[in-house]
Amino acid sequence: MSLHNSADSLTTKDLSKFYSTNAVLRYGNSEEANGVEEITKFFEAVFPLLKVMKHELVEMDRVGNKIYESCFITYIVANDPEEKKIKIPAFGKIFLVEEGKEEAGKMERFEVFLDPSEVFQRIQEFTKKA
């Protein structure tokens, strides 16, 4: 999926290709990011803390304007001398802007269900040392 390839690049330059202007991102237990600008800021804060992020799609289904997907995400934290791979399961629910509307086909809401606590614990460990 192009969205995941873009995210795996750890850059935010292509986010507006996927998210509608007023999109909402709910990532785990984080506060919702409202609008593509806030979503960009969310990822700009996280991406520099990672060396690698790789999505491995397991299954994807589309029903109407909703896409349901399960995947595994593998992370390597920046500044981790061991380059420990942390692989976590994730589930996403994507709401697309309906056909016939402005920005049709882009995401108007993306809900990501996962427990990234191991990744963020490792980030804390190595940002203190950097």
Image (cartoon, grey):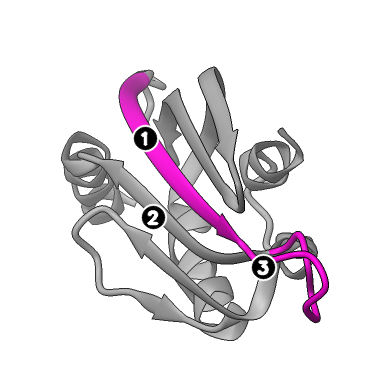
How would you rate the neighbour count of disc 1 (Cα within 10 Å): few for under 14, some for 14-19, many for 20 or more? some
The residue indicated by pointer 3 is: 97
The residue indicated by pointer 2 is: 111
Quote the CA–CA distance across marks 2 and 3.
Answer: 14 Å
Q: Does dot 2 land on a helix, a strand or a loop?
A: strand
- The spot of residue 43 in percent (x, y) is 51, 64
Q: Which mark, by number, is residue 91? A: 1
Residue 65: tell me if it is visible.
Answer: yes
For discs 2 and 3, the disc positioned in front in the rendered view: 3
> Relative to 2, does residue 73 appear above or below in the rendering?
above
Of residues 116 and 113, the one nearer the viewer is 113
Q: Is residue 1 left or right of residue 72?
A: right
First in sequence, mark 2 or 3: give its number.
Answer: 3
Report the span colored magenta: 86-106
Please count the marks in the image. Answer: 3
Residue type at mark 2 is Glu
Please check the rendered image and state whether residue 92 is part of the magenta-colored stretch, yes or no: yes
Q: Are marks 2 and 1 in contact (CB under 8 Å)?
A: no
